[in-house]
Image (cartoon, rainbow, N blue to C red):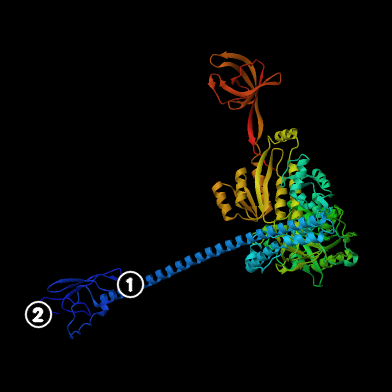
Amino acid sequence: MSDNDGKKTLGVRGGPRSGNVKQSFSHGRTKNVVVETKRKRIVKPTAPGAASSAAPAKPTAPGKSAKRPAGISDAEMERRMKALQAAKERESEEAAKREAEEQEREADRKRRREEAEAKEREEQERAERAKAKAEADERAKAEAEAAAQQAAAAAAQPAPAQPQERGSGAAKSAPAPRKQDKDREQQQRRGKGRGDDGRRSGKLTLNQALSGGEGGRQKSLAAMKRKQERARQKAMGGNVEREKIVRDVQLPETIVVSELANRMAERVADVVKSLMTNGMMVTQNQSIDADTAELIIEEFGHKVVRVSDADVEDVIDQVEDKPEDLEPRPPVITIMGHVDHGKTSLLDAIRDAKVVAGEAGGITQHIGAYQVTTDGGTVLSFLDTPGHAAFTSMRARGAQVTDIVVLVVAADDAVMPQTIEAINHAKAAEVPMIVAINKIDLPAADPDKVRSDLLRHEVIVEAMSGDVQDVEVSAATGQGLDDLLEAIALQAEILELKANPNRAAEGAVIEAQLDVGRGPVATVLVQNGTLRQGDIFVVGEQYGKVRALINDRGDRVDEAGPSVPVEVLGLNGTPEAGDVLNVVSTDSQAREIAEYREKAAKEKRAAAGAATSLEQLMAQAKENENLAEMPIVVKADVQGSAEAIVQAMEKIGNEEVRVRVLHSGVGAITESDIGLAEASGAPVFGFNVRANAPARNSANQKGVEIRYYSVIYDLVDDVKAAASGLLGAEIRENFIGYATIKEVFKVTGVGKVAGCLVTEGVARRSAGVRLLRDDVVIHEGTLKTLKRFKDEVPEVQSGQECGMAFENYDDIRADDVIEIFEREEVERSLD
């Protein structure tokens, strides 16, 4: 658009055309608008909504475009107006937010002020209650003293004068009750006091109940009775001695002074005073021996009942079951035999399960407990034991808790060392045996050879006119399984197995492990009674409460009767395999028994490993002086495997080297295991367990080696190989020649040189030599020089002459014999 004077003007959309309007924005906020006219330049501050209030622009004629400021289009102008509106909205939101925060702070200050005022009011009320109680106690004391004085005065006066004295006394004491009534009324109006008889004279409020009544400690019923008795004695005009209550005081081997006073129901100060009178300066927290405590008990007039620490186990019921209480129970069958003879596969076929598929290396490495119901409805409990030589103790435990032993022998392998060991365990446990000749489907099967081999170990089967049942079976095809189950049922019927399910449970720990998610878990075979969820029990050095019972199928059950294997959750620690589980009535009894057993076991271990005299210490030090040790740390998945590994490690070694297990445990490898291994320079062996993340990081930082194993063969072989490296290499001497000294010469700068003739073998410069005189060794060393004529040579053959000089030795004579030999090192290993 053009003006009359020919100058061009720029207008703002929606504003006047008479001047140039320049508008700028910064961060969404409008700055000053500069309006330029022909006469003057005016700077006007504009509000955020000023642009929207301007007059609408005049319409532009068709074909003519409106003139806009340079570089600003309609779209740009619209964008700037939107930014202006957004800035205004943000300002309003921030203002509202600040106002809300201010209100919240004000409310918080008000709440704190109210809490402080409430606390101050509560303190004032507590002080008032304490003051009222003190005043009530003083009044009660004054009244008691006045009553005692009146009673004493009445007893001292003659009989005729008693009414007058009583009247005068009542007249004199008349103002006191009025004052007491006034005080009592004030306290009753407040609802906070106590009456003369010590009873509460108002409603019990919540604050009084939570703060302990009158702001102080509540008296016990016994204290109230003693107070009433003292008041009655004072009213009677004299002190009457209470009748002495004689108590039976249980006295252990040592007892704390305060506990002794508690058992006698005497004041601790009186007991301490009596001890000091007898020349013992002790405090209430110190322990005294049983003889001293017996003197104190007799001095106070009580009776002594001497008990032992072992008496805590008397709470475990040792009850003989009555014949009418016994009920039939399923038999417990243990599968035993040599490794890889098909024990677990046979049990899988019976259970219709696939346990062997999950075993490392295809061998069982811990005891498994299962329950099977046959087609005829007979319930059988099976124990599957390992067959490796390292698991001797586990097989022994299996034989100790079993009723019937099924000896599995492979028809193609006959009797093996672990088979013989299983026979010995069964005979020691005096349990009947059934021979299962497995793998009968193989072409190389020879069951008659198995029967004849068993004769050597006094096991005579029925096929050879004996009394031991034998069944030919095949775990692969299922052949003979029905006959085996029938033989087991027949043997169980002959035994007439019974137990009492209606009593406190008793069982044996078959296996124990430390589960990451569930904690310590023990596989228990209940032998007597019924184990229920919630029962409190003690097992070995551990105790706990049954949190859950899980059967062999992984299902939770509420109870387990005789001959039922279950996993028990709720222990405070991992027990030893083979420990006996007993149910007790209270948690304190279980804790006391577990603590006593732990203390006894610790003392037994200390006594077994401690030298009792200086001579024994010196003998041990001398014995171990030349003995090399290989320390190791072992962690396993279950207690039985850890025990088996430790036993296998003890058998590795000889008189020169041995393997020492620093620590063995159940569960994952932890940071503390790494710290122990680093301090002793030992590797860590994990059997079916892994190290957690902190332990791995610590092992990498400290350079501790961690090795993982899932088969015990590999672990034993690796440890044996590592221990073999500690053996000193065997030094062997090989005689390579002899030489005879013919003449001795003196050479300047060299000393005596022997002119020799090599009579046998060869003489070498690098070999060792011995000087023999009359067949007696008088020197052993090395050669300083070996010459042939005038030349230094490395060796001289037999029949040739040479010159020899010994290193640092000159006492050589004619006719002496020189023995030449070489040494070689031979690596040794532990067989």
Work out whether residue 139 can be spotted: yes
Regarding mark 1 in the picture, which secondary structure is present there?
helix
Q: Quadrant of the N terminus?
A: bottom left
The image quarter containing residue 373 is bottom right
Residue 133, horizontal then vertical, whole percent: 66, 60
Q: CA distance from mark 1 to mark 2?
A: 40 Å
Q: Circle 2 sits on which residue? A: 4
Q: Nearer the viewer, residue 7 or 237?
A: 237
Contact, mark 1 vs mark 2 (Cβ under 8 Å): no
Q: What residue is shown at x 53% (from left), y 64% (from top)?
A: 117
Instruction: Determine whether 337 is above or below 41 in the image.
Output: above
Image quarter where the C terminus lies is top right
Question: Is residue 398 at least partly visible in the picture?
Answer: no
Query: Considering depth in this image, is 261 or 42 the residue closer to the camera?
Result: 261
The answer to whether 829 appears left or right of 305 in the picture is: left
Q: Is residue 594 left or right of residue 424?
A: left
Q: Dot 1: few (<14), some (14–19), or many (≥20) neighbours within 10 Å?
A: some
Q: Residues within 10 Å of mark 2 (few under 14, many from 20)?
A: few
Q: Percent from the top left, x then y, of residue 343?
A: 76, 60
Question: For the residue marked with disc 2, what is the amino acid?
Answer: Asn
- Give the residue drawn at x 63%, y 31%: 823
- Residue position marked by numbered label 1 in the rendering: 87
Q: List x then y, in percent, for residue 416.
A: 78, 53
Q: Nearer the viewer, residue 92 or 14?
A: 92
